[in-house]
Amino acid sequence: MPDLIFSDPRLARIYDVFDGPRDDLALYTGIADEVGAASVLDIGCGTGCLAVLLAASGRSVVGVDPALASLEIARAKSSRVTWIHGDATTLPPLQVDLATMTGNVAQVFLGDDWELTLRGIRGALRPGGHLVFETRRPEARAWEGWAETTHRVLDGVEERRELLDVSLPFVSFRHTYRFPDGSVLASDSTLRFRSRDEIAESLVACGFEVVDVRDAPDRPGREFVFVAQTAGGLGVSAWPASTQ
Ligand SMILES: C[S@@+](CC[C@H](N)C(=O)[O-])C[C@H]1O[C@@H](n2cnc3c(N)ncnc32)[C@H](O)[C@@H]1O
């Protein structure tokens, strides 16, 4: 179940306002150009910011997310994207050139769902297709910057963010929103911080080769940006069971 911050209609409606300008997305449109991607799958597309950008540049784009409320916001932004309510484990064999996960989606997978997601993505890529995603570097200890409770008011909605627990590799926090009518909604989230080696190993185990690990230009030193490619051009069904 996605967190309320993504799946509650009132919270999904204010998500983009609180997320602010998306300076992070240029990296992904740049990589789409770099690998010559004509078709892209955006996993955990949320309110659709990247998918809409990619479709506007003429690419064929599929956005998938399990949070229906976020997907409804995305759907209202563009009819040029194919929006799918679900996740990477329920996709048809799309054969896309590139798959993306932005906004640290990779960290929402807390257990075996990470490997299941990677295998699902592999099944949706064409042979030789690429996967690019970011994840916060554990060494940068982002949670230390979240220790102080923050307050913001945007569009008349007050947001409070507080750190709940750090039990590495898991970090939990709560967002609480007070709306102008006095109603209050709270959403708890837990993220998993995986090391570079752990991610690389999981990619290889799920049938990818790691092509590159980059920095995110808008968050220097804080993120790993993994660029992977399907290994050996094998379809998932042909991948040896022992490595799945
Ligand atoms: C931080 S948001 C990022 C949204 C979007 N990628 C962006 O950059 O704005 C994380 C997203 O991951 C989605 N998510 C949660 N669980 C998921 C799963 N199992 N598979 C795919 N997406 C998931 C949430 O619904 C949410 O939209």
Image: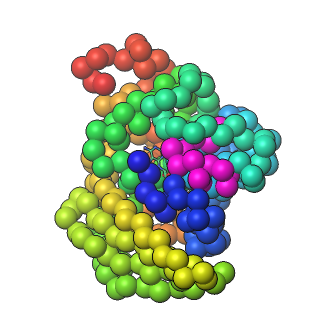
Colouring scheme applied when the structure was drawn: rainbow
Region of the chain picked out in magenta, as a range: 62-74
Residue in the picture at 31% in, 31% down: 205
User: Between residues 120 and 27, which one lies in front from this camera angle?
Assistant: 120
> Which residue corresponds to the image point at 42% horizontal and 62% vertical from the top-left?
223
122 with respect to 96 (left or right) = left
Of 204 and 154, nearer the camera is 154
Q: Residue at x 28, y 17 (%)?
A: 241
Front in this rendered view, residue 36 or 183: 183
Measured as percent of width and height from the top left, residue 139 is found at 28, 67
| Residue 135 in view in this figure | yes
| Image coords of residue 95 (percent x, y) | 60, 24
Percent position of residue 174, x then y: 37, 71
Would residue 24 be seen by someone viewing this image from the given angle? no
Q: Is residue 60 above or below residue 240?
A: below
Reply above or below: 124 against 166: above
Q: Residue furthest left?
A: 167
Q: Quadrant of residue 119?
A: top left
Image quarter of the C terminus: top left
The image quarter containing residue 42 is top right
| Outermost residue to the top | 238
210 relative position to 37: left or right:
left
29 up-or-down from 202: above or below? below
Q: Position of residue 41 (x, y in %)?
A: 60, 38
Does residue 91 appear to the left or right of 155 in the view shown? left
Q: Is residue 68 magenta?
A: yes
Q: Is residue 106 magenta?
A: no
